[in-house]
């Protein structure tokens, strides 16, 4: 990315750190205060709904109706009520379990397939790869209806009759993704051949080479794929809404959506529920912030 | 991050020095490795496409029925004759554009004739489109047909603004700014949080109560309060009091609120991608322009905008397709009081499928939407790719 910026440059006008010295940006003559004002205004708009969400989740009913900005006293009881009476504990664990299964399955199938596409020679490989990429263009609206009927067991017989209200319905369809395979393949293909030759001389086959050499070298790419898989599975809404008609395996998003109807005017409970749904994503985001933004910036992925 | 490099496939595979038997073993290994992924993608990716087309041709209302001669399609779009007239109008529009581009590039003496032809084609196109649409509307499924312009309103309302805000914020952030990482992190937050959770918040922010945040803002600005998500009237009517009704008035107030929510959700994504794009512009170009005496606005207008145009184009196409398919944002935000004025095509299809249990018909609607998305993407490529500067 930085190959074009290697030419010797005059010293930067403002910053002195090596980080700012490498990137060059034209100076704006507008007052810098104005620039900060725009940035801060943007940040306020971006963060205000979150602030309000958290603030309201600690309020009493009366305070939410009067649209107070801050609760007079923190009402932790709202969280207890949402967690226990509104069964968020149940939905939460359902989401954790299905997200975990989906991520593990997705990584398993994607790593194997990406390795094969990058490093194993077999007949029809390029055609199969092109075919795989073509699935990226299909809108979900088209595949949603047949997939739903398939899960119900109305198209082909499934093991167990129907997969409605089972964890299989929530996980199996998402255990492979063309995009993950594509991303990992690009990465695996860059690993030098000499490493494979050396591994082969030592008697290692493809599987061992993959596990012991390729994967440790590709940690960044695997992390990116894992993060996207996690967000996709955790935030999934339409599909869980369709396939969970009972509470058994209902996920957090569907639970929250149903709660919109049940909570009625009790905004503070609804907000407590919303905070519960976003906390895992926020934790992951703060831990892996760099992978998040860089993964998006380099792949341009729309989640 | 190196994931974007262009590895050459041939070099990375070691096949020389292998015997025939080893090669077969190698190939079997390859199939074995891709099998799990392909099994799932075939079942839940390839198969449903074919099956959708099959479903769209049969009666399937809760119980599977027989072929109905494309009845699902005529039911959605109306009489084929009107559809043909409408398509003819669209083709004339494309023809007008084609002539206009040619006239623009050719010698002066062609311009007059070209201009006349364009005007003629435009008049004919307008006539064909309006009469075709009117006929379709009278003979087809009004709810489905109405949802198409609503979808376009949603796309046009969100995409340009999210690109504009994204570029402006990214460009400022690209200056030497303190707390750059913090700003980027905050802007990105709305994009990664679950839509259902943020939509629940926006439902209360845009509630019709006088004390809702949106209404407090309006009161602060000295404007009358609005019913926001519960307001089926057109935005220009409800806000400016202009006499506009129905679809000709543009997006409804309810849809406008959802558009604001959509912009809020997606600006951060654009900021991150634009920032990466800005980092790739070689600084020599800026330096050359500065030596030529360009001021900061000129640098932005004549260096940044053309140099960033591939990114803008990419983001534009992705966002446009995304909004045409958008479901979650709208589904969670819609209210019965909006009288269906915020029901985009994806929502209408979902209702046909899930509420009315009319699977065959819903599949036909989904395929119509898919074809429209494909055509519009193609048109967008044709229209804008000429303005993209690839260096």
Image (cartoon, coloured by chain):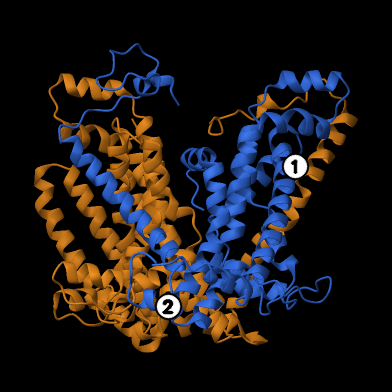
Residue at label 1? Answer: A112
Helix, strand or loop at label 2? It is: helix
Closer-to-camera residue (A22/B324)? A22
Where residue B64 appears, as percent x and y from the top left, is 68, 85
Is residue B255 shown left or right of residue A1? left
**Is the C-beta separation of discs 1 and 2 under 8 Å?**
no
Identify the subunit bearing mark 2: A
Quick check: B353 above or below B125?
A: below
Chain A representation colour: blue
Residue at left 65%, top 68%?
A: A89
| Relative height, residue B333 to residue A235 (above, below) | below
Task: State the residue position of label 2.
Answer: A61
For image coordinates 33% across by 72% down, the residue present is A67
Q: Of callouts 1 and 2, which one flags the residue occurring earlier in the amino acid sequence?
A: 2
The image position of residue A244, as x and y in percent, is 66, 75
Closer to viewer: mark 1 or mark 2: 2
Q: Residue at x 75, y 71 (%)?
A: A166
Left or right of residue A77, residue B389 in this image: left
- Residue B11 percent coordinates (x, y): 66, 24
Q: Colour of chain B?
A: orange
Quadrant housing residue B358: bottom right
Q: Which quarter of the rendered picture does the C terminus of chain B lie within?
A: top left
Q: Chain of mark 1?
A: A
Alpha-carbon neighbours of circle 2 within 10 Å: few (<14), some, or many (≥20)?
Answer: some
Q: CA distance from mark 1 to mark 2?
A: 53 Å
| Residue in the image at 40% along x and 15% along y | A6
Query: Tag 1's secondary structure?
Result: helix
């Amino acid at each position: 990315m930085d190959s074009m910026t290697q030419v010797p440059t005059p010293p930067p006008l403002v910053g002195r750190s090596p980080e700012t010295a490498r990137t060059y940006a034209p100076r704006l003559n507008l007052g810098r205060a104005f620039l900060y004002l725009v940035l801060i205004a943007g940040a306020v708009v971006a963060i205000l709904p979150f602030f309000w969400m958290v603030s309201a989740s600690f309020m009493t009913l009366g305070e939410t109706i009067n649209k107070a900005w801050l609760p007079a006293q923190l009402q932790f009881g709202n969280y207890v009520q949402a967690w226990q009476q509104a069964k968020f504990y149940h939905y939460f664990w359902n989401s954790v379990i299905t997200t975990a299964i989906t991520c593990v399955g997705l990584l398993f199938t994607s790593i194997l397939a990406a390795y094969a596409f990058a490093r194993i020679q077999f007949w029809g490989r390029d055609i199969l790869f092109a075919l795989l990429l073509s699935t990226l263009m299909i809108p979900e609206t088209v595949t949603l209806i047949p997939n739903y009927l398939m899960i119900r067991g109305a198209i082909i017989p499934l093991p167990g009759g129907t997969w409605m209200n089972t964890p299989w319905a929530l996980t199996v369809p998402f255990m492979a993704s063309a995009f993950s395979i594509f991303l990992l393949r690009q990465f695996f293909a860059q690993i030098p051949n000499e490493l494979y030759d050396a591994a082969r001389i030592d008697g290692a086959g493809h599987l061992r080479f993959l596990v012991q050499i390729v994967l440790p070298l590709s940690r960044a790419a695997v992390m990116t794929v894992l993060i996207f898989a996690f967000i996709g599975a955790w935030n999934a809404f339409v599909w869980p809404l369709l396939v969970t008609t009972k509470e058994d395996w209902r996920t957090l998003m569907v639970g929250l959506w149903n709660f919109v109807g049940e909570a009625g005017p009790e905004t503070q409970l609804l907000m407590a529920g919303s905070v519960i749904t976003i906390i895992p994503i926020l934790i992951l985001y703060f831990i892996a912030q760099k992978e998040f933004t860089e993964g998006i910036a380099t792949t341009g992925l729309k989640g | 991050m190196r994931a974007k490099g262009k590895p050459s496939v041939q070099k990375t595979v070691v096949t020389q020095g292998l015997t025939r038997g080893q090669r077969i073993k190698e190939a079997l290994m390859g199939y074995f490795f891709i099998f799990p992924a392909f099994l799932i993608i075939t079942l839940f990716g390839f198969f449903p496409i074919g099956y959708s087309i099959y479903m769209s041709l049969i009666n399937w209302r809760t119980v599977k029925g027989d072929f109905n001669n494309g009845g699902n399609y005529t039911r959605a779009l109306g009489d084929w004759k009107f559809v043909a007239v409408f398509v003819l109008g669209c083709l004339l529009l494309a023809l007008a554009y084609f002539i206009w581009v040619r006239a623009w590039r050719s010698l002066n003496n062609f311009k007059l004739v070209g201009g006349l032809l364009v005007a003629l084609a435009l008049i004919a196109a307008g006539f064909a489109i309006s009469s075709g649409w009117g006929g379709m509307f009278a003979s087809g499924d009004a709810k489905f047909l109405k949802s198409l312009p609503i979808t376009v309103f949603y796309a046009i309302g969100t995409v340009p603004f999210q690109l504009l805000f994204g570029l402006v914020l990214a460009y400022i952030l690209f200056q030497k700014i303190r707390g750059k990482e913090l700003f980027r992190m905050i802007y990105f937050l709305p994009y990664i949080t679950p839509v259902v959770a943020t939509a629940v918040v926006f439902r209360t922010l845009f509630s019709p109560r006088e004390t809702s945040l949106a209404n407090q803002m309006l009161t602060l600005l000295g404007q009358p309060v609005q019913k926001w998500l519960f307001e089926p009237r057109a935005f220009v009517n409800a806000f400016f009091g202009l006499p506009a009704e129905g679809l000709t008035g543009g997006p409804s107030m309810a849809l406008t609120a959802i558009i604001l929510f959509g912009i809020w959700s997606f600006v951060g994504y654009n900021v991150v991608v634009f920032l990466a794009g800005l980092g790739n512009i070689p600084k020599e170009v800026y330096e050359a322009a500065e030596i030529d005496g360009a001021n900061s606005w000129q640098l932005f207008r004549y260096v940044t905008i053309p140099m960033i145009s591939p990114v803008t184009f990419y983001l534009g196409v992705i966002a446009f397709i995304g909004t045409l398919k958008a479901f979650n944002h709208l589904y969670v935000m819609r209210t019965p009081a909006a009288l269906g004025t915020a029901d985009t095509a994806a929502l209408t299809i979902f209702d046909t499928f899930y509420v009315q249990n009319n699977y065959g018909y819903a599949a036909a609607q989904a395929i119509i939407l898919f074809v429209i998305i494909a055509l519009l993407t193609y048109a967008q490529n044709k229209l804008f790719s000429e303005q993209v500067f690839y260096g």
